[in-house]
Image (tube, coloured by chain):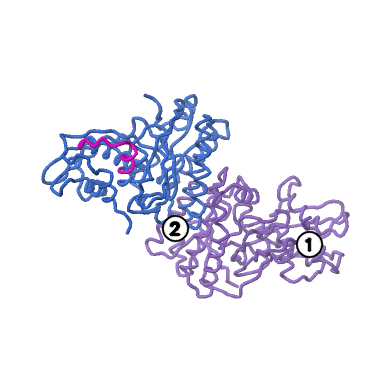
Chain colours: A blue, B purple
Amino acid sequence: MNPSKQDVVRRILAGKPLEPREHGVAFAPSNIALCKYWGKRDEELNLPMTSSLSLSLGKLGSSARISASSGIDRYELNGVAVDPQSSFARRTKTFLDLFRPDPGTHFNVVAENTIPTAAGFASSASGFAALTLALDKLFGWNLERRNLSILARLGSGSACRSVYEGFVEWHAGKSPDGMDSFAERLGNKWPELRMGLVVISEAEKAVGSRPAMKQTVETSPLYAAWPSKVVHDLSELKVAIADRDFNRFGRTAESNALAMHATMIAAWPAVLYWLPESVAAMKRVVALRAEGLPLYFTMDAGPNLKLIFLEKDADAVTKAFPAVQIVAPFEP
Amino acid sequence: MNPSKQDVVRRILAGKPLEPREHGVAFAPSNIALCKYWGKRDEELNLPMTSSLSLSLGKLGSSARISASSGIDRYELNGVAVDPQSSFARRTKTFLDLFRPDPGTHFNVVAENTIPTAAGFASSASGFAALTLALDKLFGWNLERRNLSILARLGSGSACRSVYEGFVEWHAGKSPDGMDSFAERLGNKWPELRMGLVVISEAEKAVGSRPAMKQTVETSPLYAAWPSKVVHDLSELKVAIADRDFNRFGRTAESNALAMHATMIAAWPAVLYWLPESVAAMKRVVALRAEGLPLYFTMDAGPNLKLIFLEKDADAVTKAFPAVQIVAPFEP
């Protein structure tokens, strides 16, 4: 039998304190994959088919304050009590269930997102990462980052990357228990790098990324070619980051995102996250590039674009996308 | 050395008359691929990577009237003299060069398209097929269809399918000279079947299908998975046609078109023929299907949609797409 989430938690928390302190507070950044995570080899443990590489978004992300409470769990998101029937509440409860020292332990969670919720801006990644970091403080586990990354992954795959700042690589790993499937920070910094968030729609997406991945892996004939694309792009991105070769960096990220969407478009039923306005924005980026502006985009499982450019071109980007929200991932 | 187009023509026309008669007149239908031709194994002879399957559009297509003339070639398209520098004139001249009994023979070509030119409605396929059939009459070659199909292919790959009505399969073949790469008519008819042309843009496309195919084959990591998708879809389509299983038929055609576009989207630079309005129309089809209307689409190398439905649903389709042009491929 495959290991369960509970097995993994037991192993990581062996010998760690069981008594909650007063509270734990933490922040975790959103992360945007430059080489995407798309497709699981294990649905239970969120183990990916391939490695991936992301950039954390500095101050944009999620904060979580968690304390022990009696009777029932209570969750608050962005200042509003969360409906216990909502997907957010159910996913949070399932995750917290892994960490209750006894069934009578309940939690009071106050979460804030500084990034739009569930529109392809990776709020679940930063949310589960923040929750994991806050639990570590609540119980005083003092876990090493690698283990925090593994625990966050149990909540949402890409959350394992959000326990770090900067460029982060998630190693796919091979082991059935996923103890080798964790994220690590790359040492490189790139202070001039900018990401621009272009919101096409803030509506929650019609198909969540979990079922969309599953559908792609199971039905898309083109998915077979995805893993070798990832191997190529990971290596390209690392070279581009090390050399600060912006065009190589942007081209690889854009091409990787397009290939991921292509695998979904070839699924049946097709998963088409793009809205008409997404296509218009993509074409605008390509046209600006043809005019000489070094500008690229990436897209996650949603209709929105994340622009990739350098500080020096911020004015030109703002002119072309007046509503863009610019993030400086390496700013202190 | 690989055989040239001229070698193929010489072989097919060996022993055939060399003297043009007064004129040759012919019509060839447009054809819409249900399982697409995407990628060449030989650029010179237009030999495809994979087999494909199409449906001819009855009265929609191209007519050609050709006569011998002296001095220079003269081409007229839709009542207008063609600019000798245009792509149409250059491609037509290159094709006709294959058939001049001596360099002094020139041709007067009067062509009419009953389908929009060069916007993914396969006007070059019907055009080269009509030209081939008209040449056969002009010279009195009386070639068998298979050889006419091979000759038409030398003008434009998918033209080899336009020398037939109804469902047509183009066998990819394996031979370097392409003598086994020809189209054949399937015997099946399906009188209730309808195609609906939805014009998103009549503008000539920014990237022709020839360079787009080349770019996909050379740069798209997902193209590797395309040939096995085609094998699967060809077999599905033949079963669906034989059984008149409409949903299986439509699903396979739509899925095949999406997978073809997906291979292009993963090319670098990406080939994105979709306009924002294409995406809106695709989503409208999917939404109507979710409401119970048996409606599917296919798309070629352009922004336009071809709807696939049955006669009984023509009113519902017209209501949803008021500008649709409905074709009854099997109507006499």
Q: CA distance from mark 1 to mark 2?
A: 44 Å
Q: Secondary structure at mark 1?
A: helix
> Label 1 sits on what residue type?
Val
User: Is residue B306 visible in the rendered structure shown here?
Assistant: no
Q: Which mark is residue B285?
A: 2
In what element is the residue under mark 2? helix
* Most common secondary structure along the magenta stretch: helix
> Which comes sooner in the sequence, label 1 or label 2?
1
Q: Say which residue appears at 55% left-offset and 45% top-offset.
A: B270
Placement of B143 over or under A97, stated as above or below: below
In this rendering, is residue B273 above or below A319? below
Q: Chain of mark 2?
A: B
Residues rendered magenta in the picture: A138-151
Q: Are marks 1 and 2 on the same chain?
A: yes
Packing grade of label 1 (10 A; few <14, some 14-19, many >=20) is some
The mark found on residue B53 in the picture is: none
* Chain letter of the residue carrying label 1: B
Query: Image quarter for residue B29?
Result: bottom right
x, y percent for residue B186: 61, 72
